[in-house]
């Protein structure tokens, strides 16, 4: 089907009349093109979108020509050329996807948490850190205090919990 457009003053109109010479000449002579709605700007042949579409068509023609050259002149089987096209398509998709991820990370970086959260506790629930002491001081402190016996148990999630055993003095103090 023949596609005829009328361009006047930068406005594109599509001629939808019959395809014979007399009707077309009458369309122009009687200025019936003024009765038609102009094509919207994004569908016009000089728009960016239509220019991109024309580039895609040109690329498809180059790919077709490459396929013909590879199969007729060099004798590669058609399946191998299609496989090459598939690999190129996947590689380009991966590269473009990574570029898109990098751009997105640059434009919208991930936020740092306002309060550091460790072990499921907020900063308010964290125990205060003990002052830094030397190894000698720690050894002296541990030698002075007797170490209570410790009982190991496991909670539902599989973590080992340490529980202080009650000594005789502890049970006597609890009773009082």
Image (spheres, helix red, strand yellow):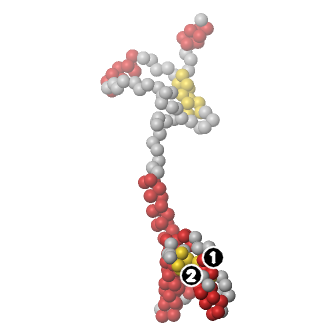
Residue 104 horizontal/vertical position (percent):
47, 56
**Residue holding disc 2:** 6
Mark with earlier residue (1, 2): 2
Tell me the quadrant of the picture where the C terminus can be found. Answer: top right
Characterize the local packing of mark 2: few (<14), some (14-19) or many (20 or more) Cα atoms within 10 angstroms: few
Q: Quadrant of the N terminus?
A: bottom right
Dot 1 and dot 2 residues touching (CB under 8 Å): yes
Quadrant of the rendered image containing residue 14: bottom right
Question: Can I make out residue 3 in this image?
Answer: no
The residue under the point 63% across, 93% down is: 21
> Is residue 165 visible in the rendered structure shown here?
yes
Q: Residue at x 65, y 82 (%)?
A: 16
Q: Secondary structure at mark 2?
A: strand
Identify the residue shown where x is 41% and y is 26%: 129
Q: Crowding near pointer 1: few (<14 within 10 Å), some, many (20+)?
A: few
In the foreground, 69 or 40: 40
Q: Position of residue 43 (x, y in %)?
A: 56, 72
Quarter assignment of residue 158: top right
User: Does residue 14 sit above or below 118 in this rendering?
Assistant: below
Foreground pick, 3 / 76: 3
Q: Which residue is mark 1?
A: 36
């Amino acid at each position: 089907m023949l596609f005829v457009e009328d361009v006047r003053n930068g406005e594109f109109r599509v001629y939808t009349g019959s395809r014979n010479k007399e009707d077309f000449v009458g369309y122009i002579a009687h200025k019936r093109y003024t009765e038609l709605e102009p094509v919207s700007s994004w569908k016009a042949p000089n728009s960016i979108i239509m220019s991109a579409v024309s580039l895609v068509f040109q690329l498809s023609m180059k790919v077709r020509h490459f396929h013909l050259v590879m199969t007729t002149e060099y004798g590669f089987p058609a399946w191998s050329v299609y496989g090459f096209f598939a690999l190129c398509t996947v590689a380009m998709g991966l590269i473009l996807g990574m570029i898109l991820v990098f751009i997105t990370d640059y434009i919208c970086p991930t936020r740092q948490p306002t309060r550091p959260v460790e072990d499921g506790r907020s900063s308010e629930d964290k125990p205060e850190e003990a002052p830094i002491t030397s190894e000698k001081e720690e050894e002296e402190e541990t030698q002075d205090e007797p170490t209570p016996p410790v009982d190991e148990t496991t909670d539902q999630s599989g973590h080992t919990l340490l529980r202080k055993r009650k000594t005789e003095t502890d049970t006597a103090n609890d009773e009082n």
